[in-house]
Amino acid sequence: MNFGDKSVAAREKLGGLISTELKLPLTSQEDLSVYYSPGIAEPCRRIAKDKSLSKTLTVRKNTIAVVSDGSAVLGLGNIGPEAALPVMEGKAMLFKQFGNVDAVPIVLDTQDVDEIVDIVSKLAPSFGGINLEDISAPRCFEIEKKLLEKIDIPVFHDDQHGTAIVVLAALKNALLVVGKEIEDVRIVISGAGAAGIAIDTLLRAAGVKHIDLVDSKGLVCCTRKDLNDQKRDFCSLNCGSLADGIKGADVFIGVSKGGLLSSELVQTMARGPIIFALANPDPEILPDEAKSGGAAIIATGRSDFPNQINNVLVFPGLFRGLLDAGISLVTEEMKLAAAAALSKLVPKPTAEKIIPAPFDPGVTDAIAEAIRKFQ
């Protein structure tokens, strides 16, 4: 039986992977009187006078929504809301296991930007935060922006910002290993969608000065006439193909598709090349092939190779900190702090260990504490 068959079998047996639970015993008539009628009227009265109390007197204190329209699921693409639900459910499981955050999976039968914004904003009074998931670019940028303007709870698109935080943390340690400074390196990012643009944004905030984005048509060059607004904001004067862009580059970050990079192209990079081949399930280049091209450090998105770049290192602790501190907006400074905290969990990085593993102790606590300091 393979992993997929095991996943289906578990879901068939259990009817999904998550459930609700009572936090207090409900075993007597007195319990009913306290926690339901008539006792329940008092928290209702207090919230009616001050709506902000709903964030401390109800499930909002520890509950977020994991929201998707099924338009960009894992490596599966636009598979629709029903087929996306197992992923949202799995995400909720990770929130609970690693951050003790209660998460409710919500899939929407629409891919219209304004409809999604309207639905999520109307659902917001039930939650302490919104985790957007598997929504295609460029729509995801617009949805996040509009929600941030409409609701007073944190909105976080994990495909963008979670990925960027883990990449930055891993890059900090990788550069220590190869003896390079972040402001000196030249980076090529393959994939100009949600993750690629978010990585570009955060790396620049961290001090990177030289980045070239690559999409399916080559380098995102400012002279191209086919760029959307997001790509236009990150275009460069360098034009040509991936092969042109990667010559002399110090770092390759792939959030695109498998098999895109060859050992021959790695050989054209600068001394001590760093390869983050993060496409799933098939990386842009397999570790053995990258090594044969001279790669000094290799990371992937897979758990069966060293240096797994996995968003689970960030989102449980990040929301844990947001909920604990009552923070309503995730800032760039928080993302940088989370990346710094994550990188410090590997005090002596090596080529085979530049980032913690999900089950390493202290990961969630470190991220949560970094966020709580912004209270």
Image (tube, rainbow, N blue to C red):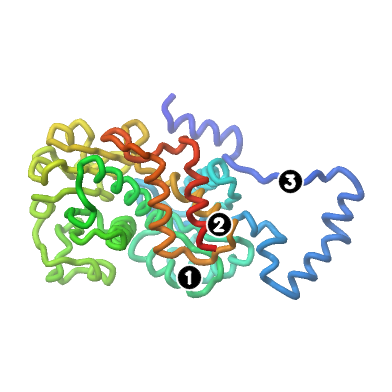
Counting residues from the N terminus, which is met first, the one under dot 3 or under dot 1?
3
**Which label was assigned to residue 65?**
2
In which quadrant of the rendered view does residue 244 lie? Answer: bottom left
What residue is rendered at 33% in x and 37% in y?
Answer: 348
Q: Are marks 3 and 1 in contact (CB under 8 Å)?
A: no
Does 291 sit above or below residue 41? above
Which structural element holds mark 3? loop
Q: Quadrant of the N terminus?
A: top left
Give the class, few, some or many, for how many residues have Cα within 10 Å of label 3's Cα (few <14, many ≥20). few
Give how far across and how far down residue 206 sits, in percent. Answer: 30, 59
What residue is rendered at 28% in x and 47% in y?
Answer: 171
Counting residues from the N terminus, which is met first, the one under dot 2 or under dot 3?
3
Give how far across and how far down residue 349 sits, in percent. Answer: 31, 38
Give how far across and how far down residue 215 sits, in percent. Answer: 20, 57
Q: Is residue 193 visible?
A: no
Which structural element holds mark 2? strand
Q: Are marks 2 and 1 in contact (CB under 8 Å)?
A: no
Q: Label 2 sits on what residue type? A: Ala
Which residue is labeled 1 in the image?
A: 148
Which residue is labeled 3 in the image?
A: 22
Which structural element holds mark 1? helix
In the displayed structure, does residue 360 sit left or right of residue 277? right
Give the class, few, some or many, for how many residues have Cα within 10 Å of label 2's Cα (few <14, many ≥20). many
